[in-house]
Image (cartoon, coloured by chain):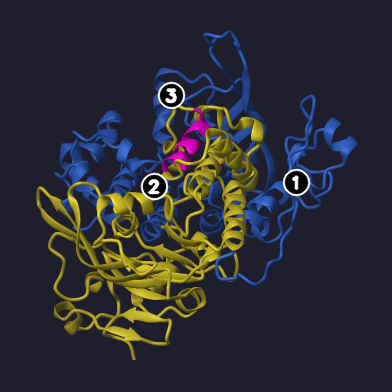
Chain colours: A yellow, B blue
Amino acid sequence: MALLEVDNLSIGYQTPKGFLKAVEGVSFSLEKGESLGFVGESGCGKTTMGTALMRLLSRNGSVKGGQILFEGKDLLKISDEEMRLIRWKKIAMIFQAAMNALNPVHRVDDQIAEAILAHDPASSREDAKKQIEDLFQLVGVPKDRMRDYPHQYSGGMKQRAIIAMALACRPRLIIADEPTTALDVIVQHQILEETKKLQKEFEISIIYISHDISVVAEVCHNIGVLYAGRLVEYGSREEVFGSPVHPYTKALLSSYPTLTGEKEKLEPIPGEPPNLIYPPSGCRFYDRCLLAKASCKTEPPAGIQLTPTHNVLCSNIE
Amino acid sequence: MEENNKPVLQLEDISKIYRSKMSFFGDAGKEVVALNHVSLKIFKREIFGLIGESGSGKTTAGRLIVKLEEPAAGKIFLDDNEITGLKGKALKDFRLKMQMIFQDPYQSLNPQVSIYDTVSEPLLIHKIDNVQTRKHLVLQTLKSVGLSPPEDFLYRYPHQLSGGQRQRVAIARVMVLKPKFVIADEPTSMLDASISAQIFNILLEMREKIGVTLLFISHNLAAARYLCDRIAVIYRGNLVEIGPGEEVIQKPKHPYTQALLDALPKFGHWDEAESYDTLLSMERDISQDAACPFFCRCKVANQRRCSQESPHLMGSDNSHLAACFYA
């Protein structure tokens, strides 16, 4: 059985202007030790989905349907207390802008110790410190910097400390929301390589959430492409980026400058994503799609399975 | 590229040093060298890319050129006229020729000013056109940056626009003056890929239409490859490599450029794990400042020579240069 199975998940936010359907009908599964990447433009629902998996949606957000099965248990049905025990112990998260995720008035090792002691009250402070030493070695931060305050760290070191914190309780699943966006490329590369190594060593499953398709392509086995709250294409990295099928995936790829191969003219995607308070009744990509037929405007797109692993949400595929 | 051409912009031995203020604990006057003897020439209708990581001094270079700051040493020329120390009328004329597109369109537009007023303000300041023709010019410019129909945008305010639309307004405000030289400092780092591509194409179009010369400042080598004729790589305030865009990316000479390319995700080429491998995994400990700025992270460095002698930009042909003895 898969570690995580998400079925038909729908999430929305109550806003002053109406109910915003941020994520609709998303299904995917994640095996132990695998990594899955979600890409899409800002506002496509990728962060919403990540926070929903941790049950950390903001107060005006709510899950409208579907299930999240983690190790066979539906996370949406368990009590807050049960969820608290799973959070960080089993599922950890690396938040967007991790630079600001550390508390500036506490020493870094104390902050990580807090996470360890909260989930393992039996262990002593000394044990926790010992564990943190190991973690720091793992993520490549010198041990003698443990007692520093966050402001004494560089951006890359803060990011490593955050990764150390995410690993502190040996979670089964890590949700990494834009883990390297604010970092320079050389540091980004080091951290991605480090994470890959740790993932293998501890058989952790990781969900990467990013707008940068090249980063996701580098580290993930499977890729999900989100557009306006819907999972429009889902499959292995080679399938989705090597032979993309959905017009949005294709458009996204051709708007992305590359370093290798022929220099081609970039084709931007015209227009803007739809307003999700009043989403269109048909395909949500209709307005921007170059291949759309008249029926796409009114009828919701059909899900098509191309291979056992490659799924696409489009009615217009031969 | 166009060597026989006269440069539009020329930087001669520019240095910029920031001094930290006296702190409460007394470690006063620490010097940070943001730019270290940088010289460059940018030719007419060229798109020139300045690439570097955060803290490399690329933004400082841009700010010096538009005269938001003054260099500590060196000279900057626009069309043979020195711009350091310009004042009054001459400075205003200079600003008409030299414009800047900023990184964050959420902060660079005044939220209380309508799009029409935003775009027409530069015309007002420089007394271009009269009231009747001004509106026409604004409409035309908005249309040329892809805000159509332009009439719909005239009386909107920034909060009613998306990030991409805002950046287009920022570009329209610059281009309405038909400047000679424009600096774009990370113009798309806040935008999604699909929107970035729109902005890149608008910049390319602007060059065709009004013959503007562009300095594109970015950390993104792939974007620079798409947009730029020539690329310069800057590391801790030092130009380390300069050359034709495609050549710098396909055949980088400087170990730092090579390390940068190694670090970038090879999108679509996961199996070809070919790398230059020039970056030391552990930084060298050095007691005093090494002569080569990349010395402490460089794998190919020679212990004696690179720590004592500082390399200048050099190369067998005149177009592609690198500041490394072993390039």
Furthest toward the front, the residue is: A122
Give the SS element for disc 1.
Answer: loop
> Residue B91's mark?
3
Q: Nearer the viewer, mark 2 or mark 1?
A: 1
Image location of residue B199, percent across then percent down: 38, 54
Q: Share a chain, discs 3 and 2?
A: yes
Going by the image, does A30 lie left or right of A200?
left
* Residue at 39 percent of width and 33 percent of height: B96
Whether residue A258 is in magenta: the answer is no
Q: Is residue B206 above or below residue A107?
A: below
Q: Are marks 3 and 2 in contact (CB under 8 Å)?
A: no
Q: Share a chain, discs 1 and 3?
A: yes
Q: Main secondary structure of the magenta part?
A: helix
Image location of residue A97, percent across then percent down: 42, 43
Quadrant of the rendering where the C terminus of chain A is positioned: bottom left
- Residue holding disc 1: B280
Q: Is residue B208 above or below residue A103?
A: below
How would you rate the neighbour count of disc 1 (Cα within 10 Å): few for under 14, some for 14-19, many for 20 or more? some
CA separation, marks 1 and 3?
46 Å
* Residue at 76 percent of width and 37 percent of height: B296
> Residue B190's mark?
2
Give the mark, 1 or 3, whose residue is nearer the N terminus: 3
Residue numbers of the magenta segment = A107-118
